[in-house]
Amino acid sequence: MAADRSVFLRSKVKIVLTGSETKEEAEAALRAPINIPRYPHFNDVHEQRVHMKQKLAAGFRLFAKFGWDEGVAGHMTFRDPEYPELYWVNYFGQSFSQVRASDLVLCDHSGAIVRGNQTVNKAAFVIHSAIHEGRPDATCAVHAHSMYGKTFSALGRKLLPITQDSCAFYEDHSLYDDFGGVVYTPEEGERLKSALGQSKAMILKNHGLLTVGSSVDEAIWWFISMERCCMSQLIAEAACTNGFEGLKLIDHDVALGTRSNVGDKQAGFFQFQPMFAQIVKEQPDLLD
């Protein structure tokens, strides 16, 4: 799945002309380099910051498109590339469908505003400050009250390896088994951080999903994929006469091997790119 593990070879068979293509054009196409998706290169930290803000804004627009906004609930953050003790977040009360890159607010781990003129969700900085502090590798953290994620969270258990997609989370997601209401206290944030551990994702019982990633792209993709895995398992369990006990699980070793292909950080980054291109084409104002 990951681009650096894929082998791209030019065909050694005879040239096949397509349409009105000439032999010379076909030969030139055969000599042209093959583009392999890579992480973007930035000339400076300011260019990187703008790019990351645009990716986060795209994530909000996608969540709105999927119907994963719930009033003022939900937040995404990313660690500033120049000042890692600060992070960018959506301001409190803005519709996901209207978030632009320029709307994001920069704040510190106490929730104090460093850049911007809007307030932020207290629960957002309590959760995210703890996660970013405890996971230096977590550039981005995503949490929303999506329908299937919050529904599955009511079961108080983890996802099972029932599909190729769910294998991305096999033995790489945790369960926060303690709902204490809206997260307002630092103590609750610390417990969330401890429960997440080194996993890429967490199911918050009676609450929803939370994902992290080394890039904005990765963290958003894990949330999208995990939400769909929750949906898939709920449907599969509903179709079984004896619930989850009737599911056919993927073998442990096979699930781990599959995770190594579809569940690493490069796979997470790469799989977000088609969605990013789609939403930017549909809603280019998010880049402003």
Image (tube, helix red, strand yellow):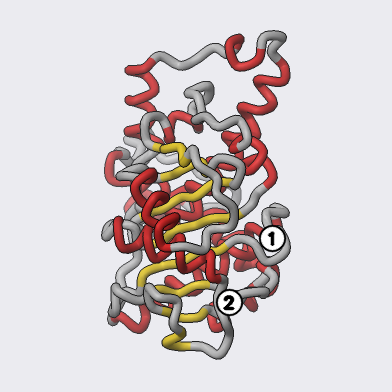
Q: Residues within 10 Å of mark 2 (few under 14, many from 20)?
A: many
SS state under label 1: helix
Q: Is residue 111 above or below residue 27?
A: below
- Between 55 and 247, the one nearer to me in the picture: 247
Please name the amino acid that badge 2 sits on: Tyr
Spot occupied by residue 81 in the image (x, y as percentages of width and height): 31, 74
Mark 1 neighbour class, 10 Å CA radius: few under 14, some 14 to 19, many 20 or more? some
Look at the numbered discs 1 and 2 and tell me whether their residues touch, using CB distance below 8 Å.
no
Q: Position of residue 56 (x, y in %)?
A: 51, 67
Q: Residue at x 36, y 37 (%)?
A: 11
Residue pictured at 39% horizontal, 23% vertical: 255
In this orientation, which residue lies closer to the viewer: 180 or 56?
180
Q: Is residue 45 at least partly visible in the picture? A: yes
Residue 245 lies left or right of residue 136; in this view the side is right
The mark found on residue 64 in the picture is 1
Residue highlighted by disc 2? 91
Horizontal side, residue 196 vs residue 145: left or right:
left
93, above or below 225, in the image: below
User: Looking at the figure, which quarter contains the N terminus?
Assistant: top left
Q: Nearer the viewer, mark 1 or mark 2?
A: 2
Give the percent coordinates (x, y) of residue 4.
28, 45
Is 3 drawn above or below residue 43 in the view shown?
A: above
Q: What's the residue type where badge 1 is placed?
A: Ala
Q: Which mark is residue 202?
A: none
Does 2 sit left or right of 88 as displayed? left
Would residue 32 be visible to someone looking at this image? no
Where residue 168 appears, as percent x and y from the top left, is 43, 35
Kindly identify the residue that appears in the image at 44 percent across and 29 percent down: 167
Which quadrant of the view contains residue 277? Answer: bottom right
- Dot 1 or dot 2, earlier in sequence: 1
Q: Is residue 279 left or right of residue 238?
A: left
